[in-house]
Image (tube, grey):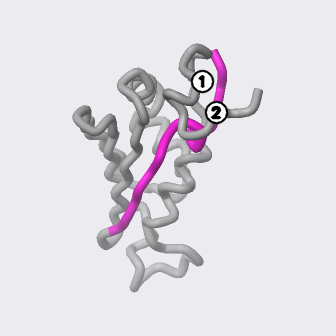
Amino acid sequence: MAKVQLRYVAQARSGDKGNTCDLGLFAKTKEMYEVFKREVTPEKVKAHFAPLVKGEVSRYEVPNVYALKFVLEDALGGGAPSSLRTDNLGKSFGSNLLRMEIEVPDELLTEEHCIQVPPR
């Protein structure tokens, strides 16, 4: 089993509303989606974004598009108009999540299942 960054096996979209970040993680295939369900838990996402996310992280499964949706509460330093952060919007959270490492079975590290096959 290989440990790879999500950027090789997923696409992400994110945005914000007030102090909440909304994050979507998309797999290319059903097999990779099953890996995401096992590896990308709300607890791991919260730990990945520590100490930025102070509230709950909720996960919703969207199997018809092989996606996981995460809602990160109290994640943006109070929201755009009240935060002193350099980047206080949720758009950067998707790129940040793609740096998270997960374990992927070796047989799924092919062009069929990956956005870009990771170097070995």
Q: Nearer the viewer, residue 100 or 106?
A: 106
Residue 30 against residue 6 in the figure, above or below: above
Magenta span: chief secondary structure: strand
Kindly identify the amino acid type of the residue bearing the numbered disc 2.
Val
Q: Is residue 2 left or right of residue 68?
A: right
Q: Is residue 13 covered in magenta?
A: yes
Q: Nearer the viewer, residue 100 or 110?
A: 110
Kindly identify the amino acid type of the residue bearing the numbered disc 1.
Leu
Q: Residue at x 42, y 36 (%)?
A: 27
- Compare marks 2 and 1 and give the one earlier in the sequence: 1
Question: In which quadrant is the C terminus drawn?
Answer: top right
Q: Say whether marks 2 and 1 touch (CB < 8 Å).
A: yes
Residue 22 is situated, as x and y percent measured from the top left of the image, at 34, 57
Could you say whether the residue bearing mark 2 is in a helix, strand or loop? Answer: loop
In the rendered structure, find residue 109 and report the number of the disc placed on it.
1
Please give the residue where the numbered disc 2 appears in the rendered image. 117
Q: Residue at x 39, y 75 (%)?
A: 79
What range is drawn magenta here?
A: 1-16
- Badge 1 crowding class, 10 Å Cα cut-off, few under 14, some 14 to 19, many 20 or more, is many
